[in-house]
Amino acid sequence: MFYNSIINCDFTYKCPTDWDKLSETKNNNIKYCPECDKSVTLCRNQKEVDEASEKGICIAHPIFPRYSEKKVIDFEPGIAENFIKDVPILTLGLPRIKDASSIPADELQHFMNAQFDTYDIILKELKAYKKKTHWIWYIFPQISGLGESLNSKKYALNSIAQAQRYWNHYILGRRLKECLGVLMQSKEPLHQILGEIDAMKLQSCLTLFHKAVPEEILFKEALSKFFKSELDQNTLRILTTAN
């Protein structure tokens, strides 16, 4: 059986070592990854995943085909209690929320699918402060009506309400905040990191989420840092027309 790779403590990059190749420990159900300096325990089925999640225990679980019913992306990583002294333990599989019924079925799944095998690459690029691949649409989404390309239309959010649901999504919201937080640490000009066009798309995204979740100060701070607090007028026009 194949097992999914481990995600390290800052939830950014995947460890190349699979469960079957990790070092044995005195506990048969816990192994150690010397490359990441992490220990991890194994859950072999969904019941064990749920039980481990309830207790806050680190887990690794079987890798699921990308288009099967259950996917690795359904679960959220986090830090849990350490059961081996002096070895930091890693969690994989802790859902941030139990009830996602407030989000319409499949409404945001295309974002999840797009980020599934690209998110670690995206974070690497952001941390290097140089965007090299194409992902701006599904990491920093805009309001519908701005772009004409297929990707702009596919990954556009159609309302303030949908932007709020995106922000409250147990994975997408965290990733938006994480990516923006990395950008905020940069001392490089934004256009050198993203390029001129994608910098404009970021301004649109920040304007949308600033209006959708005004209590979240991060968007206000990002607008101040990158755009001298100027909101994107086209986004405001669309939002005003929609109301």
Image (tube, grey):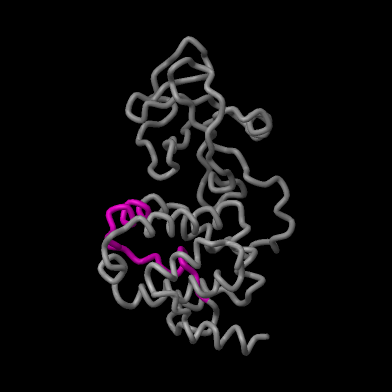
Q: For this view, does 212 lie left or right of residue 91?
A: right
Q: Position of residue 120 (x, y in %)?
A: 39, 50
Residue 241 lies, with reference to residue 18, above or below; the image says below
Q: Position of residue 189 (x, y in %)?
A: 27, 67
Count of picture labels = 0
**Which residue range is magenta in the image?**
121-142
Q: For this view, does 34 lie left or right of residue 41?
A: left
Q: Is residue 5 visible?
A: no
Residue 141 lies, with reference to residue 114, above or below; the image says below
Quadrant of residue 228 within the rendered picture: bottom left
Residue in the foreground of this view, choosing between 227 and 122: 227
Whether residue 138 appears in magenta in the rendering, the answer is yes
Whether residue 118 appears in magenta in the rendering, the answer is no
Residue in the foreground of this view, choosing between 27 and 232: 232
Quadrant (top left, top right, bottom left, bottom right) of the C terminus: bottom right
In percent of the image, x 35 and y 66: which residue is there?
Answer: 134
Residue 152 lies, with reference to residue 68, above or below; the image says below
Q: Position of residue 105 (x, y in %)?
A: 69, 61
Residue in the foreground of this view, choosing between 194 and 28: 194
Q: Residue furthest top?
A: 26
Q: Is residue 184 visible?
A: yes
In percent of the image, x 46 and y 33: which residue is there?
Answer: 2
In percent of the image, x 41 and y 31: which residue is there?
Answer: 18
Q: For this view, does 225 lie left or right of residue 66?
A: left
Quadrant of residue 159 within the rendered picture: bottom right
Quadrant of residue 37 within the rendered picture: top left
Q: Position of residue 187 (x, y in %)?
A: 28, 60
Residue in the foreground of this view, choosing between 27 and 207: 207
